[in-house]
Image (tube, grey):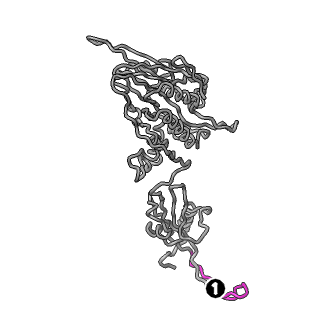
Amino acid sequence: MSNQTGRDVSKGSVKKFRQGLGLLKNHWKPDEQPETTEPYKLTQTGRNTAIIESCPEGALKTLDGLLREGNVDLDVWRVDRWVLNKWPVGAKAERKSLRWANGRIEEGFVESDGLTVAQLWQVKAWLVRIKPEPLYPIVQPIACDYEYSVPALPLPKQSVRRSVIVTDPHFGFVRLPLQLKVIPLHDRTVLDLALQIFAYCHADRLDVLGDILDLSDMSDKFLQMPEYSDFLQPAVNDAHRWFRRARDINKSARITAHEGNHDIRMITAMVKHLKGAYDLRAADELELPPMYSVPRLLALHKLGVLWIGGYPDDKDWLNDAVCLSHGDVARKPPGATARAIVESSDVSKVCGHAHRNEFASRTIHRRDDSRTISAHVVGCACHTDGRLPGSDSEEQWQNAIAVIDYDDLWYNVTTIPIEDGVAIYDGKLFKAQ
């Protein structure tokens, strides 16, 4: 017997039909069978991805037909890729003529013509949202009612100005499972003392030299431990509150925030896992930083805080002799970081990154004069007890801030160590509140 959907099959071909049945069994598993009579199955595989596939027994053989049957909105979804599968399946070929009465066959016949083969088709497409929805955890930019413009550099030339330096706060949190407690990675006592001294010394500048956020759960280099996850929004909130306090202290000061190697983790994670959101900006805020970036999340533009990006080229100059940056050098032995920096530089540098207090200098001798350059590595504003990812309780880290007095030609750096919430500066004792 033969028709449009099958052909006669000899006994010698039974093996091929069994193989065809095996192909069907492997391709469409029983637990994947549609529960309804719909000619397609739509599966949401993620917030921004889905799979639509036709049922093998159906008549769909084209991508357009599948999308039309499944009512796929092509203004919302795009087809990332698709396949058309086909395979034979064997079945009995029978002719029947039966008459039933009271649930029993009274008369009739069943004639078998052996086996026939049918061609089954399946269209399968992988869909991706054109405009991705936010991934969990949803992180919102700070809603800030402040509105400051970035102040110009104050005071005329030749007058002495002052900058307070804060490095590596690493705003973030970690969960302590056994204690059912959440603790901050950033040291609030150090950050409080920094603002106290900022207010006391009437500084013209506050420069935060990078690693504003820790972003441990966005790292692609280290193992992401679950106890550090889901705290990005609280970290953003805490960091914004601290910058807002700084702005309340001095509304005319020049406040800068440098991009550090931890801050850049957000960009790296986006490029690798959500490229469509990279550098994305709201249509009515094109002049602002990208929606998913550290300066935008912290609403630094509302506070008049100048973002110094482009790590590791986040350079800002106090004068022609002193450069501020986050830094990209960290050596294990004490003093080795400052030494490495000063040996490779021809200007004085103030930076963070190494989480240690270090100083080194060298003198450059020229024909008619000499010039001294130095490297100042300012300690950190994060906890040093091993709670930061990748650290331990015996790290050679120190908490500190610095105050720099400078004019157009000269400068002096005063490093202020901080221990147990106490700092001494200008003959006065400061205690964290």
Classify residue 116 as left or right of residue 253: right
Asked whether 397 or 212 is in front, the reply is 212
Q: Evaluate whether residue 171 shows in this view.
A: yes
Q: Main secondary structure of the magenta part?
A: strand
Which quarter of the image is occupied by the C terminus? top right
How far across and down, in percent of the image, does residue 196 sit?
Answer: 54, 27
At horizontal 51% and vertical 47% (from top left) the residue drawn is 143
Q: Evaluate whether residue 327 shows in this view.
A: no
Write down the quadrant of residue 343 in the picture.
top left
User: Which residue is outermost to the top?
Assistant: 368
Asked whether 181 or 10 is in front, the reply is 181
Q: Which region shows up in magenta?
A: 98-114
At horizontal 54% and vertical 38% (from top left) the residue drawn is 241
At horizontal 33% and vertical 25% (from top left) the residue drawn is 157
Q: Which residue is labeled 1 in the image?
A: 109
Classify residue 425 as left or right of residue 413: right
How far across and down, in percent of the image, does residue 302 sit?
Answer: 45, 42
At horizontal 41% and vertical 15% (from top left) the residue drawn is 361
How far across and down, in percent of the image, does residue 238 sit?
Answer: 56, 38
* Amino acid type of the residue tagged 1 in the rendering: Phe
Question: Was residue 153 drawn as part of the magenta stretch in this picture?
Answer: no
The relative height of residue 111 versus residue 314 in the rendered view (above or below) is: below
Asked whether 308 or 207 is in front, the reply is 207
The relative height of residue 166 versus residue 102 in the rendered view (above or below) is: above
